Amino acid sequence: MKQGIHPEYKVINVHCACGNSFDTRATTDNIAVEICSACHPFFTGKQNLIDTAGRIEKYMQKYNLADKKSND
């Protein structure tokens, strides 16, 4: 490796909008994030499931389309 061309790789503290903070290594001095593993719904298990039942039926009714099945 060439000397003097690589940035300094140091330990920094990452701050999340939820108040969580953790240490990691990076070349920047400060990292602020809006969402982290402590508050992200995928990792916390508190996902809001969207009820999508009836969307196809609503579309078919809106445009007066009949349910056509092909016999192929």
Image (spheres, helix red, strand yellow):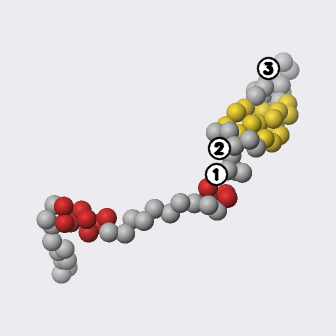
For the residues labelled 3 and 2, say whether their Cβ atoms are less than 8 Å apart: no
Which numbered circle lies on residue 52?
none
For the residues labelled 2 and 1, say whether their Cβ atoms are less than 8 Å apart: yes
Q: Earlier in the sequence, mark 2 or mark 1?
A: 2
Q: Which residue is mark 1?
A: 40
Q: Residue furthest front?
A: 19
Mark 2: few/some/many CA within 10 Å (<14, 14-19, 20+): some
Residue 32 locus on image (x, y percent): 70, 33
Which numbered circle lies on residue 5?
3
Query: Tag 2, which secondary structure?
Result: loop
Relative vertical location of residue 47 with respect to residue 28 in this rendering, above or below: below
Amino acid type of the residue tagged 1 in the rendering = His
Amino acid type of the residue tagged 2 in the rendering = Ile
Amino acid type of the residue tagged 3 in the rendering = Ile
Residue 56 locus on image (x, y percent): 29, 66
Residue 49 locus on image (x, y percent): 50, 63
Q: Earlier in the sequence, mark 3 or mark 2?
A: 3
Find the distance from the CA under tag 2 to the CA under tag 1: 6 Å
Rendered image quadrant of residue 15: top right
| The C terminus lies in quadrant | bottom left
Q: Nearer the viewer, mark 3 or mark 1?
A: 1
Relative vertical location of residue 39 with respect to residue 21 in this rendering, above or below: below
Q: Nearer the viewer, residue 69 or 29?
A: 29
| 71 relative position to 15: left or right | left
Q: Residue at x 24, y 62 (%)?
A: 59
Residue 17 locus on image (x, y percent): 68, 39
Which numbered circle lies on residue 35?
2
Mark 3: few/some/many CA within 10 Å (<14, 14-19, 20+): few
Find the distance from the CA under tag 3 to the CA under tag 1: 37 Å
